[in-house]
Amino acid sequence: MQHIPAISVVMPVYNAGPYLETAVQSILRQTHRDFELIAVDDGSTDDSLHVLESFAAENNHLRIISRGNTGIVKALNDGIAEARGEFIARMDADDIAFPERLERQLAFMKDNPGCVAVGTGLLHIDSDGDPIRIDRWATNHAKIDGQLLQGGGGLAHPSTVIRLDALDRIGGYRPEYEWIEDKDLWLRLAEIGQLANLPDVLLAYRIHERRICWERKQEQNCLWQSLLKETYARRGLDLPVPPIRLFRKHSGSPSVIRRKWIRAAARNGYFKTASKHARYLVRNEPLAPGTWWTMARAMVSCLISSSLHSPRSIQSV
């Protein structure tokens, strides 16, 4: 008789490059052992499929779905359709799950049967895996749902564990809201159960210069407007006036993004990370607007942070 795992980890994979091996290993090394990892190769053109096949040859926790490129929503729904566990855990192919992630989330879900989805706190890391900042989300349902209805908040998508029966009840992810598919999911799940976030930092969330959330701001804003109108109508609510504030518009240029990383890392006590990106700016963009101002602000933040706490690392969070 085939064993039914308690939890199915669904990982969409598309040209995951140098990050995939670490992401897969972080799941295979979980303290909770009753799981399956379903990796959906979404038509990768790099060696992602080869990396997955190498892992699968040595570990029966891993199953692979491989087909042409369809996008993340179809990849997620395909993975969920193959899942055998009572719970679905989301995982991205460039992130790192901390060893106790599944154990803690599964325990929370079993202790809270009315909860349909739970996320965790995040440690933001750069492309090298160096820490930038810690991000914790609202933990109670009322606040999470209220923030979503105002165009923000929710759950950190790649950190979530969701009840499979709840996903089935709402019909899974909807392709018309791709790029904000998670926000759509949380709003619909909130109508049939409770949402929650653990304050624990259980996932290292990798951000790099071409992360999708920076590339599609305008498209996401249009989708958000449509989604909120639909949600308010479905719940019988009036849209607030003035209009809901959505994603802030900003330049997504590499220099702007690096300046944000420098300031965030300095404020959070990750001085080596701040110094690394500062050196990059000075070396490659010494005349760019904001480079030296960012350096000065980072130095002040470093002095303030160092007086308040000692630097942390990904190992000590």
Image (cartoon, helix red, strand yellow):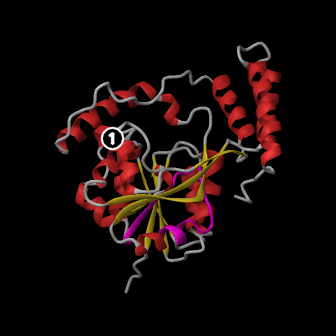
Q: Where 19 sits versus 283, above or below?
A: below
Residue drawn at the location 46% of the way across and 57% of the way down? 160
- Is 218 part of what is drawn in magenta? no
Residue highlighted by disc 1? 149
Chain part drawn in magenta:
85-105
Q: Quadrant of the C terminus?
A: bottom right
Q: Quadrant of the N terminus?
A: bottom left
Name which residue type carries label 1: Leu
Q: Is residue 315 left or right of residue 104?
A: right
Residue drawn at the location 48% of the way across and 27% of the way down? 248
Tell me where residue 241 appears, x and y as whole percent. 28, 26
Q: Is residue 70 left or right of residue 128?
A: left
Q: Quadrant of residue 227?
A: top left
Q: Where 145 sits versus 27, above or below?
A: above
| SS for callout 1 | helix
Q: Where 245 sits versus 119, above or below?
A: above
Tell me where residue 17 appears, x and y as whole percent. 62, 45
Tell me where residue 143 appears, x and y as whole percent. 40, 50
